[in-house]
Amino acid sequence: MARAIMLQGTGSDVGKTVLVAGLCRAAKKRGLKVRPFKPQNMSNNAAVADIPGDNNHGGGEIGRAQWLQAIACGVPPSVHMNPVLLKPQTDVGAQVIVQGKVFGEARARDYQALKGRLMDAVLESWGKVGEGADLVIVEGAGSPAEINLRSRDIANMGFATRADVPVVLVGDIDRGGVIASVAGTHLILPEEDRRMIVGYLINKFRGDVSLFDEGIKAIEKFTDWRCFGVVPWLKAAARLPSEDSVVLERLASGEARALKVAVPMLGRIANFDDLDPLKAEPQVEVVFVPPGKKLPPDAGLVVIPGSKSTIGDLLKFRENGWDRDLAAHRKRGGHVVGICGGFQMLGRMVRDPDGIEGSVMEAEGLGLLDVETVMEPEKTVRNVSARSIQFDLPLEGYEIHLGRTTGPDTRRPSAIINGAEDGAISADGKVIGTYMHGLFGADGFRGKFLESLGIKGGDLDYRAEVERALDEVAAELETHLDCDAIFSLAR
């Protein structure tokens, strides 16, 4: 087995994903063969990864965080980097993905009972990820301080103790109370778990790092743990794909630019990092619109993103009054793009005769495309090569969806994907639907699309920008953390 080190947080959203990606890139720059691993992830932002040895399957699902971390390592993503992925469908239930494939659906209480069986898959994937690697950097989920869940844990100390992986604890100073959160974690952990922690680091510090010197002394007094460093607020992290919808609550509109793109924040929004390449364009302002707020009337483009619960989100879309806002947007001559679940919502009707998404069997669509969607049990999961019909330019992306969409507007497809027609375009060309995620990541297409909206764009090499951001994060970590000590403690 490769040597390994694990980052666990004092809570959710303390920045573990970016820290692991940065450490992976730092290790790669040192010439190490490094791999990421996250035993369990909960996110509707999924990526498509290879399933080794399965040539008949289009691909498997993992969290996009591990996809990003694989990029940081310079290796193709594998389903074994994230063996258990939970995709929330309701407030109390989620679809369970195991080693890339749909395992089933479970309510929160039922899922706790499943964990014993899932640990076997986690440990199997753990063995495969380490093959041929020098170092594996593991990301925990939530917090090890959730001792009420410890007996069946597979994401934090349950995994660390089984796999004998040393742990670095991450505290987030930006949210306040970081001394208490680190010291409190030490206090409540059982001795078996506490001894796995080899030290801690402080993340998201703003200002003069030396001002926390007394804080480090205080934490040492309570815990006797080593501090590996204090990481400043990483500005480059804003240029990296976001892991999950937690960050949407903090997104604010930036300065006004030539084109405003409005994105309704669906309750089960999925793969909203489709918008990241547009956000990176200097003349484009992307505004995520929370429930209860109107779609801005000055938006030139509305993008309806993917959804893990199309019918449920469609009903909420109407409840919010966004259907009226969208109709007004169209009357003003505005453009609309629907991606995956958003594409399905743009049609006349969405039907779910088998109750795959829930108890509501059908819902009237937004009626901007003359198509209908029927949900079907078989899920499409694959990376694709495609071509935009509208601009005759290459596209690259992926599909993760249930359902088949048909109707007159599909005779004006938006793309050719792996040789087959995909999507639909309205008669006036201003409403576009597609099942392909990632289309805005194609620089040439993005430039021509923005040009069709009267905006100059497309000079940005988006993938190169992600690579530069990873390099910058790694450089910051090398400056502010004792990376030598962290890597040397891996075992």
Image: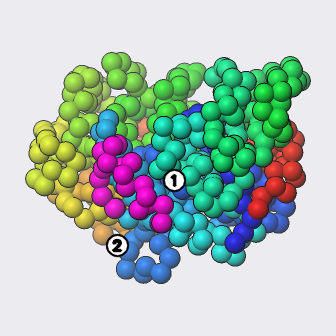
Q: Residue at x 65, y 67 (%)?
A: 75
- Residue 170 visible within the image: yes
For residue 160, what is the image quadrant?
bottom right
User: As shown in the figure, which amino acid type bears the numbered disc 1?
Assistant: Ile
Residue flagged by tag 2: what amino acid is it? Gly
Q: Foreground: 299 or 350?
A: 350
**What numbered label is drawn on residue 154?**
1
Instruction: Specify whether residue 459 is painted magenta.
Output: no
Residue 283 point in image, percent of width and height: 57, 33
| Left or right: 480, with 415 as reference point | right
Residue sitting at x 72%, y 53%: 166
User: In the rendered image of this protein, does residue 436 appear above or below residue 242?
Assistant: below
Magenta-colored span: 102-121
Q: Which residue is mark 2?
A: 419
Res. 311 mark: none
Mark closer to the chain start, 2 or 1: 1
- Frontmost residue, 154 versus 458: 154
Gap between marks 2 and 1 measured at Cα: 41 Å
Residue at figure coordinates x 58%, y 55% from the top left: 159
The stretch drawn in magenta includes residue 106: yes
Neighbour tally class for label 1: few under 14, some 14-19, many 20 plus, Cα within 10 Å: many
Quarter of the image for the C terminus: give it. bottom right
Q: Position of residue 128 (x, y in %)?
A: 59, 72
